[in-house]
Amino acid sequence: MVAAIIRHFKSLRTMERDGGMLQMFLEEANNERMHLLTFVRMKVSTSTPDCPLPASVSNIRSHRIHRHFFVYLLSQVNLGLGQCSLQHT
């Protein structure tokens, strides 16, 4: 939603069309909202103390963060922008 607003203000400022980017950002915000509502419903429906939902969500998020960071490091090494500590010179 924030990206759509920024894009809208930029197109107003420059008086140029954005090529449909505004609609794409709004659809993506709606998609994220639906995911959030789905998980809120799951949390309400499984509100027992032994439910592993919060732990599984936290676990998945931490794995995704580590995976994205690892891919970022690999892309920097492949582009020659970073130094890899595993290389022997």
Image (tube, rainbow, N blue to C red):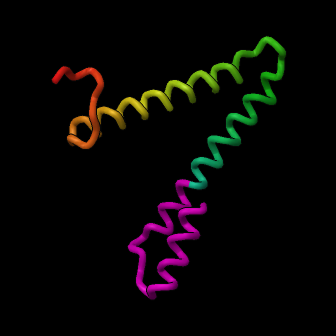
Q: In the displayed structure, would residue 68 be above or below residue 49?
A: below
Instruction: Tell me the quadrant of the picture where the N terminus can be found.
Output: bottom right
Q: In the displayed structure, would residue 8 be above or below residue 43?
A: below
Q: Please state the horizontal and vertical placement of residue 86, each as a whole percent of the image.
A: 27, 21
The quarter holding residue 60 reads top right
Residue 89: within the magenta? no
Task: Name the residue: 41% across, 80% down.
Answer: 17
The quarter holding residue 55 reads top right
Instruction: Tell me the quadrant of the picture where the C terminus can be found.
Output: top left
Q: Please state the horizontal and vertical placement of residue 36, each as a whole percent of the image.
A: 67, 41
Task: Name the residue: 29% across, 32% down.
Answer: 74
Task: Name the residue: 58% across, 70% down.
Answer: 5
Report whether 50 appears left or right of 70.
right
**Of residues 71 and 87, which is closer to you in this image?**
87
Residue 19: within the magenta? yes
**Of residues 80 and 45, which is closer to you in this image?**
80
Q: Which residues are magenta?
A: 1-28
Task: Name the residue: 54% across, 63% down.
Answer: 3
The secondary structure that most of the magenta stretch takes on is helix
**Of residues 87 and 12, which is closer to you in this image?**
87
